Amino acid sequence: MQEDDPELPPDFSSSAKQAADSSQAETALQQSQAHLEAIFQGAEVGISEISTDGYFLRVNEKLCWILARTREDILTRSVAEVTFSDDVANSQKAFAELLTTGRPVSLDNRYWRPDGSVVWASSTLSLLVNQYSGARTVLAVMTDMTQRRKAEEALRQSEERLRIVMESVTDHAIITTDTESRITGWNTGAQNLFGYTEAEALGQPGAIIFTPEDKVINEPQKEIETAHREGRAMDERYHIRKDGSRLYVSGVTSPLYDVSGELLGYVKVARDLTERRDMEEALREADRRKDEFLALLAHELRNPMATLSNTLLILDMTGGKNESLPLKKALAMMSREVKQLVRLVDDLLDVSRISRGKTELRQQRLELIGLVRQAVESSRPLVEAGRRQFTAQLPEEPLFIRGDSVRLTQVVRNLLGNAAKFTHEGGHIWLSLEQEGQVAVLRVRDNGIGIPAEQQGRIFDMFAQVDASRTRSQSGLGLGLTLVREFVELHGGQVNVYSDGPGTGSSFEVRLPLSSEPKNKEIDEQS
């Protein structure tokens, strides 16, 4: 008697489909891991993952380049082994602070290279915590600062040599006073620096160039006492001009003696360091913005990676059968996070090309109204989210320009995205396009949080963002407006921002030259 064929379980087809879906999830995992690895290895900054006891667990190619070591060599070492001996305590203090507070920590250290040379680097440390095991590691983002340090040291040495020379040069401010601190000599340099003519200055107290707050704490007299006691008094401080404006001055005050050794008075040689002071302030501000950007970059990369990792872990544990996270929902979540990573990487790549002057435009004759309309439609879901109202006003007559359709579309989308980001729920966003002479004018206006006057001048700068405390809930690296300015200027146009301050909304205006080509010329297809 022939045996019957075995009967298939009733849910065999469902299991097979789930197996296929699981295979697709594994493929998506592999692709996302490969993508994250490419981001990690291709970053323009050194990135490493470090154990809480200070040993390297994972490093990227840029870090290997900074330290001039192979990956294999670094992974056998602790941070202390590659750190300059005098800076080890600084690293240990930073690690302890990070592990105690959980907040990102920034530090500047020196590191040994195998050939015995030393490299300066600025690092930001962030804490990574496994949501399930609780295991903690440290994410370190490092930037090579060696050349800047060398430049600073060269500047310091140059200034020291210059100071020695300037003590005897008459074309800088040279002021003499008697023993009662009354001005007895006032050269042309002093007049140029402080605004008083010689006739106005002679006989006046030497303190006339000191600020009110320094006079209150008796700094003019302290300077004289130091010069008398030690032979010279060096200072760098703000002084005040005749018109009340301030300047930052480096000065050397020395006693004057006659041939018999009797004290005649004092001489002060001063030079204006206001510009250098401003540059130092700008450098510190740039460093602060850079540190904020690196911390934000680590945060923006970590969030989607954490979602992907946790989702894949749940899928692995449940086989996609968890009711609260079915496979379809999990795949949608992973797809969204991967798209976010792609957007971040695209912005970083665009900024990198701009910084290196490698941005290229694929210019062609474009009908601007159609391009703006397409950009508006693709951005409409974002703009109208949160019950925001959106009004677009486009002209009926076509406007032709020569440009790169991809980059100009990005300009419109970035401006709309920026307006949506900073416009509260229920707010209003307006877009208009019109012709003014031979220029196309695009305006994007909102009634959102506005821009403080002191931030409007640098709103398009790289790493610059509106007060982070007011926008912390929003994602992104803050590079959108930087890209807008660069792309507009590459098209021969200009972009401006207008705002009456916090709570008054803002308006961005893009002006692009219209095409001078004949209107009957065949229009290229927009990509």
Image (spheres, rainbow, N blue to C red):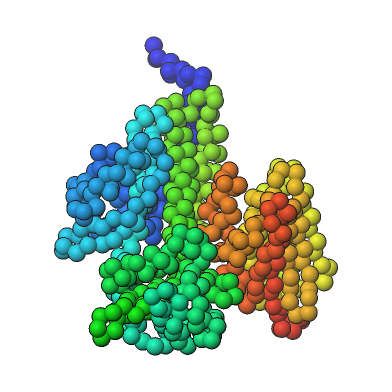
Is residue 495 positioned above or below 204 on the image? above
Count of residue discs: 0
**138 sits to left or right of 296:** left
In this picture, residue 400 sits left or right of residue 46: right
Residue 124 position, x and y percent, is 38, 50
Quarter containing the N terminus? top left
Residue shown at 75% from the left, 80% from the top: 438
In the foreground, 226 or 259:
259
Q: Residue at x 32, y 49 (%)?
A: 48
Q: In this picture, is 132 found above or below 245?
A: above
What residue do we see at 51% from left, 19% from top? 10
Q: Is residue 516 left or right of residue 43?
A: right
Tell me the quarter of the picture where residue 219 sits: bottom left
Work out whether residue 197 can be spotted: yes
**Residue 356 in picture, x, y percent from top left:** 44, 71
Give coordinates of residue 476: x percent, y percent: 54, 51
Residue at x 43%, y 15% (from the top left corner): 4
Residue placed furthest toward the right: 396
Quadrant containing the C terminus in the rendered view: bottom right
Residue 134 vs residue 246: left or right? Answer: left
Vertical position of residue 142 compared to residue 104: above or below: below
Compare residues 297 and 377 and report the one nearer the observer.
Answer: 297
Residue at the limit of the structure toward the top, as seen here: 1
Q: Quadrant of residue 324?
A: top right
The residue positioned farthest toward the left in the image shown:
115
User: Is residue 239 something one can see in this rendering?
Assistant: no
* Relative to 190, residue 484 above or below: above
Observer-nearest of 262 and 292: 262
Q: Position of residue 17 (x, y in %)?
A: 50, 31
